Amino acid sequence: MNTRHSATVAAVAPSSGVEPRKPGLLERFTDHFQRYWQLWVLSAPALVFVAIFAYVPMWGIQLAFRKFDSARGLTGGEWVGLHYFEQFFTSPLFGEILWNTFRISLWTLVTGFIFPIILALLINQIGSSKVKGFVQTVTYMPHFISTVVIVSMLNIFLDPNNGFIGKLFGDESLLGSTTAITAVYWISEVWQHCGWNCIIYLAALSSVDPSLYEAAKIDGAGRFQLIRYVDFPAILPTAGVLLILQMGSVLNVGFDKIYLLQNSLNMPATEVISTYTFKIGIQSAQFSYSTAIGLFNTIVNFVFLITANAISKRVSNSSIF
Amino acid sequence: MNASTTANVAPLAPRASGDDIPWNKKQRQTRTAGDWIVDIIIWALVAVVVIAVLYPLWFIIISSISDPNAVAGGRVSWLPVDVTFAGFQRIFEESSIWVGYRNTLIYSIVGTAVNMIVTIPVAFALSRAEFKPRRVILFLFTVTMFFSGGLIPSYMLYRDLGILNTWWVFILPGAVSVYNVIVARSFFETSIPEELHDAAQIDGLSYFGYFFKIVVPLSSAILAVIGLYYFVGHWNDFMTGLIYIIDQDKKPLQNVLQQLLLVNQTTSTASVGVSDAQRAADQMKFGIIIVSTLPLLVLYPFLQKYFNKGVMLGAVKG
């Protein structure tokens, strides 16, 4: 009763406070909690979970700079500085893994950025809203299929003997080829997520002022010019922000899919940072080394995010922070 | 389908039923040859897209009920050949699938329930402008989207907490997704009128009362979207079962699928003279794909109308 009342007073007339003196720190705290303890209770479970499952592991990052000592726990090992980073940078696999990660994620990022825009412009051209709805429903669907199922579908379709795609490419399996696997990866990504990712552009397109179309037509614009000079500029700001966000994962190749696609033949082209961390860390129990590689990955991603954000802020005035 | 689309496409601006677009109505009489060509190109592209998405799914369906020899011989392309349900029969006898199914069902339902209980209240609290600490809390949450401890520190933490190789590992670590908190918060900020809060205060409702009696009942759309995101995430989760679960009888569906669909794969493709038994096992794969994806596809039509809204809110700057 009490808390609610004081909150109302504060919200309605914050300037008509009765106390002319500045309240002390303790007083302010108790006042805050009296008003907002219910909001704190509502936040508490999430705060506890984030603290334990996001921040405690962050504390454990120091393992990357320590020699792991199982007797003395996560943070008790001997301090070795950048030893494990050096080990990674000088490892014969370093160049290969870094190149694989960059190549696969860059292909996926660029195609995953361009195709939804094209699809949205295309769907927006459909006049009948029934057909439009149907196309949207169909193209969203694959987004919900699990990675395991997607990869087994790829195995079936790309089978060189009787897969309907694999047959077209001769006797060599595309999944075993170090040159084709990148294309297999990004094309299947586009197939699965393109429809879903174009939702946001369709929403941007639906809010274009119709008078813009009229004006452009009076100026003699044809269909293609309408797309080029009205639709396209309308989705650019959205596209910019999405591109920045994606830059933050330039060194992230989703673990599941690439791990499931790996086989002994394509391994030179498919070993990426996330799968390597898993193998080093979980399978061969080199905890410190694995943590160092993971940290390297996070830092590179963060640098890319900040850079992309700064560039975008200067060029187009749109940024995420 | 029609109603849902028009509702969907225009959550932000009340336009965009097809007839309003100038070239549909007014220009119909004065279409030039160029317009017709553009139209034909567009329809052709749309047809290509739809077929490219649907055909692989259709192929899985017809193959699952066709004779395995016809599938292996490449005679199945548009319609099922020599219809048989032997593949599905074998699936029903394969107990490992159903153990995985049961596990995933439990993990997904309990997991999603916990997700919602944790996510929605904090999103509400963070949507209240008068709650000053929300800036700091949001910042601390957002940081975790870009920075994480990584695999090994998390693994060690789970080990110390004793949740490795237990079903808690599916529920607790992912209990709150910051992305979904931000989505829900944007919804509460933009879609629940502030006047309701004023009215609630005048009527003597506390924050609890306002949240449970007014905000939650008004938010079914966003609850559905976020519930779906979480449920799909649990259902399709492969990594957790791979890394943190050792016992076979605790493995979720996706890991059982991997063993059935992918690990056995090499033997079937490498062998030249494949036996009938092998072919039947191959056919089972098509059925397994269908059975494992079915629950999500059943939920899909019910939730479809909420998708656009959910995605749009996620795009709102955090």
Image (cartoon, grey):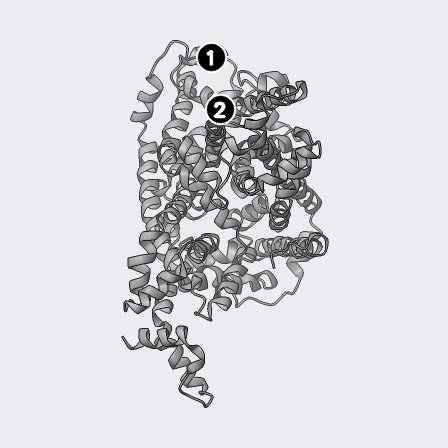
Observer-nearest of B91 and B139 = B139
Residue type (three-letter) at the residue carrying disc 2: Leu
Residue B76's mark?
A: 1
Q: Can residue B266 be seen in this snapshot? A: no
Report, in whole angstroms, how far the alpha carbon at label 1 lies from the one at label 2. 16 Å
Nearer to me, B123 or B74 = B123
- Residue A304: which disc? none
Q: Are marks 1 and 2 on the same chain?
A: yes
> Circle 2 sits in a helix, a strand or a loop, which is it?
helix
At horizontal 39% and vertical 64% (from top left) the residue drawn is A43
State whether residue A295 is above or below residue B50. below
**Residue B31 visible in the snapshot:** yes
Mark 2 falls within which chain?
A: B
Please tell me the numbered disc located at residue B54.
2
Sequence-first disc among 1 and 2: 2
Q: Chain of mark 1?
A: B
Q: Is residue A233 above or below residue B30?
A: below
Q: Position of residue A228 (x, y in %)?
A: 68, 35
**Looking at this view, is B114 or B106 the one in front?**
B114
In this picture, residue A82 sits left or right of residue B220? right
Q: Position of residue B313 (x, y in %)?
A: 48, 50
Q: Which quarter of the rendered picture does the N terminus of chain B lie within?
A: top left
The residue type indicated by label 1 comes to Val
Badge 1, how many Cα within 10 Å: few under 14, some, many 20+? many
